C-alpha cells in the first residue's frame, strides 16, 4: 500500500473511533464515573421501566431494562454454597444437571475458626462459584446473633458475639465481591428465632440493639462495603423491619449504605411504607407456598402496580422511586455491567481445599481427658462408628441454605479412608424419623433394636466413636422452625449412656449448629463439637480425629448446662419464644458469656473455648502506656509459647471491662483476637491493638457512643472463662 493510502486509512480509523466513542451512551461506558452512568441510565428510563426494575420478575431474578440493555439481576442462596437452580416461579428445584456445587462449611464453623483471612478465602471461593453460575448476588452472609440455642437457623450465622461476627463477616463480603458478585448481609434486623418469624414483634432496648444486634451489620456496610442487605421477616417495635427507619435512618442515613436493600422472600407488607422507608427491591411476595404462580403476581407486588398507581395519583413522589432505581442501576454497574469482572470458577480443587481447611480450623475440641483424641492410626484394629450423622448427607435440606453438591465426604467415608475399611465397623445406633419433614419421632421398636445392636458391638470394640448431634430436619437445625427442646433427639442421650457403660473408650463427636444439653458430659472421656462441614466433612473430621491436623477451633457461642441457664430462657416464655405477638429481649445486653460473667452462672463450655493437642503458655502482658487519650490505641503484647510436642494454633482473645461505668455494662466484652500458629516449642511475641474508641458503650438517652474516663481491665484469655493474665489501664 502506498503512503497516501496508509495516511487515508489512519484518518479513517481515527475518525471512526471518535464517532464510535461519541455514540456509546454514557451509561454503557464503564470508563465513565458511576454516578454519571446512573444519571444517564435513569434519564432514559420510562416510569413503567423504573417501576418494573424494583421488584422481582421471578423467584430469584429482577427484570433489568431490556430496551436499554440493562441486564436482569440474578440472585441465589446461600451463605455456604450456590444453591441448585430453582424454578422460575416456584420453590421447586429446576433439576438442572450442571449446578452441583462445592458445599463450604456452615458459617458457624467459619466463625469457630476465628480466622479472618480464611474467611476472605471462603468468600472469594464462594463468589467465584456464584459468578460461574452467572449469579449477580449471593444471599449471604447471615449475621443474626445467636440468642437462643433453639433458633433453627443459628447454623447459618456467626455466633453470640457482635465483635466476632463483625470481624468474620467483613472479609467474607470482600472475598465474594472481588468476583463482581454482590454479597448480601442478612437478615436486617433482629431475626433471632424462626418460631413465628413471619410476624413476631421484637421488643429490645436501644442499647442492646446498638451494642449487640447491629454491629455486625454496621461493620459489613462500613468496612465490608457490602453491595446488598436483606431485610428480616419480623417486626421491631410494631413495624416490619423490611420497611422501617432501621434501614431508612440507621442503615442508609447514619451508616451511609449505598447499595440495594432487598426484602426477604415475602417480607414486604405495605406499599407506602416500602416506598418511604427505603425498601429498594421487593422479592418473593406471596411466594408463601400458597400464592405462587398466581396470575400477574409480580405486577401486583407492593412496589409494582400499587406503587405506580400512587405515583400517578400524586400520593407518592416519583423521586422516591428514582432513589431505588439509582441503587439498583449501581448494582448492575458493580456486577453484570462491569466488563472487567472475572469469569469465576466452579467445583475446583482450590475450592475443595478452602472448604476442607475451614472445616479443619473450625472443629472445636471441647473435652479430651486421658488424651482420648487423637485416635492414632494403626493403634486399634476394631474401631466402631455409631450414629446417623456418620453417614447422613448434611448439605441437603435445612431450608434456603440447602445445596446440591458434586461431592460430600461423610464422616464414615473419611474415617474408612483414614483407618482402612478392615478396621472400621459402622452401626446407625438410632433413626431420625420417616423423612426430614415429618416430626422427628422415630418408631421406637426400630430404634430399640438399633440401640441394642450398637451396644452389643461396642462391647467388642477397641474404641467407639459416636457421631450424632442435630441434623437439617424440620425442628432441628432448619429454617422456618425452631428446635423443640435443648436435648438431643432420637434417643441419643440414652444410647450414649449405654455405650459408655459397656465401653469406657468412647469419644463423642457432635455435629450441629447449636449448643445442646450434655447429660453424659462427665461420663465420657472426650467430646468434639463439629459443624455442618460441607463437601469435605469426612476428610476434615478424619484428619482431626487421627491427629493429622491439630484442632484449633473455638466456640462462637456459650453452651449452657441447661436451657434455663441461657439468658433468653431465664426470663420465661415472654423472653422466648414470646406470646406469638411480641417477644421481649429481657436479657438486654447480657447475651451469652456476658450473661454468664455477670450472673456468675457457669456454662458447660464457654464462648471462645477450644482445646488443642498441644498446650500454650501465655507470658506476662505489657502495654505501651499506663493511660490513654480517647483518640489513641491501646497496644498490648505478650509472649505465647507452644509448650507441647505438636505444632498448633491458639486463638488468643482480649476482653475489656470498665471499672465504674455510668450505665450498666457486661463484666467484659471481646475487643480483639488473634489466631497464632506456633511450631512445637516455638514462642512468638503477640501484639494486640485496641483503639480506645472501641471501648465505648451506647448511651441511649443521648443516642451516641461514649468512652468514659475510667479504669479498664484487659483480660488476655484462651476463652471467655479461661483468663490467662490481665492488665489495668486508664482512659483519661
Ligand atoms: C428465605 C430466607 C432467606 C433466603 C430467601 C430466599 O425465606 O429467609 O435467607 O435467602 O428466603 O430463599
Image (cartoon, rainbow, N blue to C red):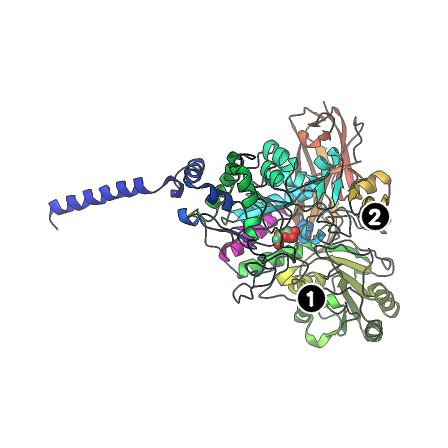
- For the question of whether residue 639 can be seen, the reply is no
The image shows residue 28 at horizontal and vertical percentages of 39, 43
- Which of the image's four quarters has the C terminus? top right
Residue situated furthest top in the rendering: 732
Q: Is mark 2 within 8 Å of ligand 1?
A: no
Residue 667 is a magenta residue: no
Residue 119 is a magenta residue: yes
- For the question of whether residue 97 can be seen, the reply is yes
- Nearer-the-camera pick, 663 or 356: 663
Q: Quadrant of residue 637?
A: top right
The image shows residue 646 at horizontal and vertical percentages of 70, 56
* 41 relative to 487 in the view: left or right: left
Q: Which residue is mark 1?
A: 411
Distance CA(mark 2)–CA(mark 1): 28 Å
Q: Quadrant of residue 725?
A: top right
Magenta part of the protein: which range?
115-139
Residue 650, numbered circle: none
- Nearer-the-camera pick, 95 or 164: 95
Image position of 399 with respect to 619: above or below: below
Decide whether the magenta segment is chiefly helix, strand or loop.
helix
Q: Secondary structure at mark 1?
A: helix
Image position of 312 with respect to 706: above or below: below
Q: Quadrant of residue 260?
A: top right
The structure residue drawn at horizontal position 57% and vertical position 47%, both measured from the top left corner, is: 183
Residue situated furthest bottom in the rendering: 422
For marks 2 and 1 on the same chain, the one whose residue lies earlier in the sequence: 1
Image position of 384 with respect to 630: above or below: below
Q: Which residue is mark 2?
A: 603
The image shows residue 198 at horizontal and vertical percentages of 70, 49
* CA neighbours of label 1 inside 10 A, class few (<14), some (14 to 19), many (20+): many
Amino acid at each position: 500500500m502506498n503512503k497516501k493510502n496508509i495516511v487515508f486509512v489512519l484518518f479513517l480509523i481515527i475518525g471512526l473511533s471518535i464517532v464510535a466513542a461519541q455514540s456509546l451512551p454514557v451509561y454503557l461506558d464503564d470508563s465513565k464515573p458511576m454516578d454519571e452512568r446512573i444519571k444517564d441510565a435513569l434519564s432514559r428510563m420510562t416510569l413503567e421501566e423504573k417501576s418494573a426494575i424494583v421488584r422481582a420478575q421471578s423467584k430469584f431474578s429482577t427484570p433489568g431494562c431490556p430496551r436499554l440493555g440493562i441486564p436482569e439481576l440474578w440472585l441465589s442462596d446461600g451463605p455456604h454454597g450456590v444453591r441448585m437452580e430453582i424454578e422460575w416461579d416456584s420453590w421447586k428445584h429446576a433439576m438442572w444437571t450442571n449446578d452441583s456445587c462445592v458445599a463450604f462449611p456452615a458459617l458457624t464453623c467459619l466463625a469457630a475458626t476465628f480466622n479472618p483471612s480464611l474467611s476472605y478465602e471462603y468468600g472469594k471461593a464462594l463468589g467465584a462459584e456464584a459468578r460461574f453460575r452467572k449469579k449477580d448476588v449471593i444471599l449471604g452472609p447471615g449475621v443474626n446473633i445467636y440468642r437462643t440455642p433453639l433458633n433453627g437457623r443459628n447454623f447459618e450465622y456467626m455466633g453470640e458475639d457482635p465483635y466476632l461476627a463483625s470481624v468474620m463477616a467483613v472479609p467474607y463480603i470482600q472475598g465474594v465481591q472481588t468476583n463482581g458478585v454482590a454479597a448480601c448481609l442478612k437478615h436486617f434486623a433482629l431475626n433471632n428465632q424462626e418460631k413465628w418469624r413471619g410476624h413476631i414483634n421484637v421488643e429490645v432496648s436501644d442499647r442492646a440493639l446498638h451494642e449487640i444486634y447491629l454491629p455486625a451489620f454496621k461493620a459489613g456496610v462500613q468496612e465490608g462495603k457490602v453491595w446488598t442487605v436483606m431485610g428480616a421477616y419480623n417486626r421491631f417495635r410494631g413495624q416490619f423491619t423490611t420497611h422501617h427507619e432501621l434501614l431508612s435512618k440507621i442503615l442508609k442515613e447514619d451508616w451511609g449504605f449505598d447499595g440495594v436493600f432487598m426484602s426477604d422472600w415475602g417480607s414486604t407488607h405495605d406499599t407506602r411504607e416500602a416506598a418511604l422507608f427505603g425498601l429498594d427491591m421487593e422479592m418473593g411476595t406471596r411466594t408463601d407456598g400458597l400464592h405462587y404462580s398466581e396470575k400477574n403476581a409480580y405486577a401486583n407486588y407492593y412496589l409494582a402496580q400499587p406503587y405506580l398507581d400512587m405515583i400517578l395519583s400524586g400520593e407518592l413522589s416519583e423521586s422516591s422511586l428514582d432513589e431505588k432505581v439509582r441503587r439498583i442501576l449501581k448494582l448492575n454497574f458493580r456486577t453484570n455491567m462491569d466488563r472487567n469482572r472475572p469469569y469465576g470458577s466452579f467445583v475446583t480443587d482450590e475450592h475443595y481445599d478452602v472448604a476442607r481447611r475451614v472445616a479443619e480450623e473450625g472443629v472445636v475440641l471441647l473435652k479430651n481427658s486421658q488424651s482420648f483424641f487423637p485416635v492414632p492410626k494403626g493403634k486399634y484394629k476394631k474401631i466402631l462408628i455409631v450414629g446417623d450423622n456418620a453417614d447422613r448427607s448434611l448439605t441437603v435440606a435445612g431450608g434456603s441454605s440447602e445445596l446440591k453438591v458434586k461431592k460430600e465426604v461423610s464422616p464414615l467415608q473419611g474415617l474408612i479412608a483414614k483407618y482402612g475399611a478392615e478396621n472400621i465397623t459402622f452401626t446407625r445406633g438410632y433413626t431420625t424419623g420417616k423423612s426430614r419433614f415429618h416430626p422427628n419421632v422415630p418408631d421406637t421398636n426400630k430404634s430399640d433394636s438399633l440401640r441394642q445392636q450398637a451396644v452389643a458391638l461396642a462391647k467388642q470394640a477397641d474404641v467407639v466413636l459416636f457421631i450424632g448431634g442435630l441434623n437439617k430436619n424440620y425442628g432441628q437445625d432448619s429454617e422456618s422452625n425452631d428446635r423443640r427442646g435443648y436435648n438431643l433427639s432420637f434417643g441419643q442421650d440414652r444410647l450414649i449412656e449405654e455405650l459408655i457403660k459397656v465401653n469406657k473408650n468412647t469419644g463423642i463427636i457432635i455435629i450441629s449448629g447449636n449448643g445442646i444439653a450434655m447429660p453424659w458430659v462427665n461420663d465420657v472421656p472426650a467430646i468434639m463439637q463439629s459443624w455442618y462441614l460441607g463437601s469435605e466433612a469426612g476428610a476434615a473430621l478424619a484428619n482431626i480425629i487421627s491427629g493429622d491436623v491439630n484442632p484449633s477451633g473455638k466456640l462462637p457461642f456459650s453452651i449452657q448446662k441447661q436451657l434455663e441457664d441461657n439468658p433468653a430462657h431465664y426470663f420465661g416464655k415472654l423472653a422466648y419464644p414470646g406470646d406469638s405477638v411480641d417477644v421481649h429481649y429481657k436479657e438486654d445486653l447480657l447475651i451469652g458469656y456476658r450473661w454468664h460473667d455477670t450472673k456468675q452462672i457457669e456454662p458447660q463450655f464457654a464462648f471462645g473455648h477450644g482445646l488443642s493437642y498441644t498446650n500454650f503458655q501465655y507470658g506476662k502482658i505489657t502495654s505501651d502506656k499506663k493511660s490513654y487519650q480517647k483518640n489513641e490505641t491501646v497496644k498490648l503484647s505478650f509472649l505465647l509459647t507452644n509448650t507441647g510436642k505438636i505444632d498448633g494454633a491458639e486463638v488468643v482473645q482480649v476482653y475489656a471491662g470498665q471499672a465504674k461505668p455510668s450505665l450498666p455494662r457486661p463484666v467484659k466484652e471481646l475487643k480483639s483476637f488473634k489466631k497464632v500458629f506456633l511450631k512445637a516449642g516455638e514462642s512468638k511475641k503477640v501484639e494486640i491493638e485496641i483503639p480506645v474508641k472501641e471501648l465505648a458503650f451506647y448511651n441511649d438517652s443521648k443516642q451516641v457512643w461514649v468512652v468514659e474516663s475510667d479504669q479498664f481491665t484487659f483480660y488476655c484469655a484462651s476463652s471467655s472463662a479461661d483468663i490467662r493474665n490481665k492488665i489495668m489501664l486508664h482512659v483519661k
